[in-house]
Amino acid sequence: MIEAVIFDVDGTLVDSVNLHARAWVEAFRDYGIAIKFEDMRRQIGKGGDQIVRMFLSDQQIANFGERLEQHRAQLLKDRYIPQIEPLAGGRALFEHLLRNGKKIALASSAKEDELAKYKQIACIDDLIDTETSSDDANNSKPHPDMFHEKPKASIGGLTAGIFFNASSNLRESSSRNPPSVRLGGGESAERGCRPRASRCDGPHA
């Protein structure tokens, strides 16, 4: 019996996948590197350090990899986060889970400040038992560390399930991985499979 649920955020609770890809493409372009949108979009769901390694040489990473990641984060904050919309049904699902005695955790490759904004957009900031951002894990997605750091402290010992969007979000590593369900968010929302919800930009009353 499932006693706790761990949710990914991008493409699962908020419709942000395409916007993340655009921010990365723009950041790489500003450093003189052309990346196709489709190629970048397939990488979304991984941590920024993993994405940088996909497109830069070791020497480029040493020269400007960290600055590029910081530039991407600033572009996302200034230009793209204001465009992110919640996917429909997130808050209602969380309320249903809580009424049925389930614990809820978030496991996101976003930075802590980005994750705080996504919780506000999705109107779920008052419904979370615990969370993990990229600031908490030793290895970013697709490594499973996200699902075994802070959430483990809060829901350790409970039988948990994972809801996520991108197949790159979770690397099958061992029996450590709980049962998982892939949700059709992000681009699927544009096809009508996961409609968007009204945006909520502040703490839910």
Image (spheres, rainbow, N blue to C red):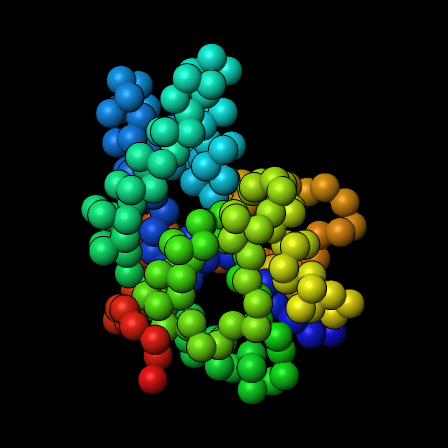
Q: Quadrant of residue 84?
A: bottom left
- In the image, 177: left or right of 85? right
Rendering coords of residue 7 (x, y %): 54, 61
Q: Quadrant of residue 148?
A: bottom right
Q: Is residue 133 above or below residue 159?
A: above
Q: Residue at x 27, y 53 (%)?
A: 81
Position of the N terminus, as image quadrant, is: bottom right
Q: Residue at x 56, y 41 (%)?
A: 140
Q: Is residue 34 above or below residue 46?
A: above
Position of the C terminus, as image quadrant, is: bottom left
| Residue 40 visible in the picture | no
Rendering coords of residue 99 (x, y %): 56, 87
Q: Residue at x 26, y 31 (%)?
A: 26
Rendering coords of residue 185 (x, y %): 40, 55
Q: Is residue 39 above or below residue 156?
A: above
- In the image, 159: left or right of 22? right
Front one among 3 and 121: 121
